[in-house]
Image (spheres, helix red, strand yellow):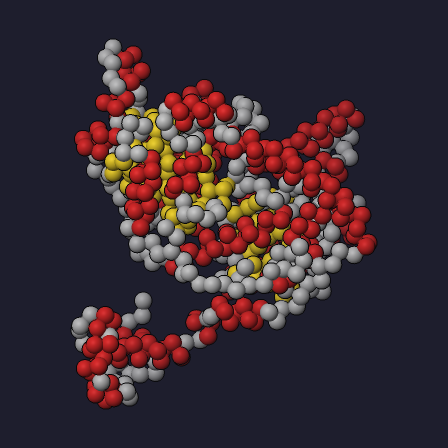
Amino acid sequence: MWNNVASCALGRLSHNATPPLLPALQTLNSVSERKYKGFCHGEQPIRELCIHYKWKRMHDMLPRRLVSDRTKYRQYAKKYPVLDGRILSVYRHAFEENLRNSEAVIKRYSELLEMVHKGGGEDAVLRHTQRNKKLFVRERLKLLLDDESFLELSPLAGLNLPYGDVPAAGCLTGIGKICGVWCVFMANDATVKGGTIYPIGVKKQLRAQEIAMQNRLLSVYLVDSGGAFLPLQSELFPDKSHGGRIFYNEARMSAMRIPQVAVVCGSCVAGGAYVPTMAEEAVIIDKIGTLFLAGPPLVKAATGEYVSPEDLGGAKLHSEVSGCSDHFASSEKEAYECIRNVISTLNYDPLPEEVTEHDSPLYSCDELLGLAPWDYRCTLPVQLILSRLMDGSRFQEFKANYGTTLVTGFGHVEGHLVGVVANNGELTHDASLKGSHFVQLCGHRSIPILFFQNTAPHTAEPTSISQAEAHSKRLKAQASMMGAVACAAVPKITIVIGGSYGSESYIMCGRSFSPNFLFLWPNARVALVDPRHLSTVPRAGNSDCTGGETELKHLKEKLEEESSAFYSSARLWDDGVILPQNTRKVIAQCLEILDQQKYQVTSPCQYPVIRM
């Protein structure tokens, strides 16, 4: 990265100058030849040592910020003020109401998650494992991933949709470690509708690819798909963000030098066949992996000829004749061992294995259940939540006495420095200006931002000139913060801890502002307006703004259903529902995933890998 002239300049040495230690080094030539043989590769050891000496001086002369030590930062962080996380008696009533609601929604969350983990149901799993001799998708992931916990994305996607239940959208996506490297995985679940792709499944795979591109993560496809679900073809084929975008993304990711590998671990028909053939390397499993645009039934219908799946598109055909597969595996276990070996050849260095020492919060994360507001009126100071998430409950607050309805500042999560932007009331004029200032600071300092979103319900319209002027000023200040958030070129993670309503949800980095990750607590609400604070039916034009009681009741019921966290997650408006007590762990995982980019060495490449 640095040439010799630049190194000399930074080391305060002229390009042709003789380093002061050269005479002494020359007398030690024979010793250095032996000692630094591996370092010098047997060529001019003295020259190499001189360069090493220049590097040392350059390192000493560089600004501290360029050679920063995370351990030193953590030591400084221990001097941050400690948040007072005590739950005062005045908050006890709201705390208990929140706790009761949290227990109810977590029970519902657990029921939905249990249903999703069964895939297409017991009969479908038995048919898949016993008759078809294939592993269940979650067993496949155990063989593929390192023996560590992984981050599953949007597990509740596909539930209670207009066209029925599609558990986990028919595919598992997430981020886990393979050979120590964080990877995005996309694994079809053939027990759900035979692996047929539904519109929600396309959306889920596209989101996984978006995360891979945004965070430069290696991608692994476990393909076991029957192609598109034809009755819904108009919702998954023709448009820009429909099925074809998956293949477009594969080509773009390859050109971006983001490696992609695939395992053909079942029937891959039609669109499902393009995924492994567009990956950079593919493994196919004997007897169970097949690859064709149209299967034996269509051949029979078109030509009257019977052909077996193996002869038409089996593992031997594609490994020995077509070249569509690069590796032949006799079993699933062998296939996942092979794909792990492939990943070890990608020159994709894992994160440094440094021991990160960090303090736990001073307050129990289990108490977050009582701090998760079931209604905006039960919102408690957001500092109580931060005191249960930050290392040592320490937080360096920014402009603590100005615009107090927005809390901003710096803290650490498992050793990772983050900027925090958290709702603590209505986003006022002062709070918006403060937020805009702080977000720009994080952008200039390259610090990831955590948004804790609990926006105020729809506010009343101004009824006087003075109120209208104040309203106008607030909107301008909010527009300033919105622009700062949209243009901040740093990683952003959003946690919806309460309400996500109206335009303030955009300002707090909602889904349309493309955060790297966005998660909901089970109590969260996502809607244009809060149905519990709606008193009239909005109407267009000059018509009467007051609807009938029946109409208002129906609208409230509809909004109540559509604003729940489970309704949102089923439609992939987020990356999943997480339990409040697991929030710190999930944030730390996301920050570690984001950190991996720092250790990648990439060079410009304008074309994908073209197979065959």
- Considering depth in this image, is 44 or 484 the residue closer to the camera? 44
Residue 514 placement, left or right of 308: right
Position in image of residue 73 (x %, y %): 52, 69
Q: Is residue 255 above or below residue 397?
A: above
Location of residue 440 with respect to 297 vertically, above or below: below
Tell me: residue 476, above or below residue 79. above
**In the rendered image, is residue 199 in sight?**
no
Q: Residue 266, how many percent across, how many down?
A: 35, 29
- Residue at the outermost right position: 90
Q: Is residue 119 visible?
A: yes
Residue at screen point 50% across, 52% down: 589
Q: Which residue is at a point 59% across and 33% down the rendered structure image?
A: 112
Q: Residue at x 33, y 38 (%)?
A: 333
Say which residue appears at 71% left-offset and 65% top-offset. Answer: 401
Asked if residue 185 lies left or right of residue 308, the reply is: right
Work out whether residue 202 or residue 393 is closer to the camera in this orientation and state it: 393
Where residue 477 sits: x, y (%)?
65, 55
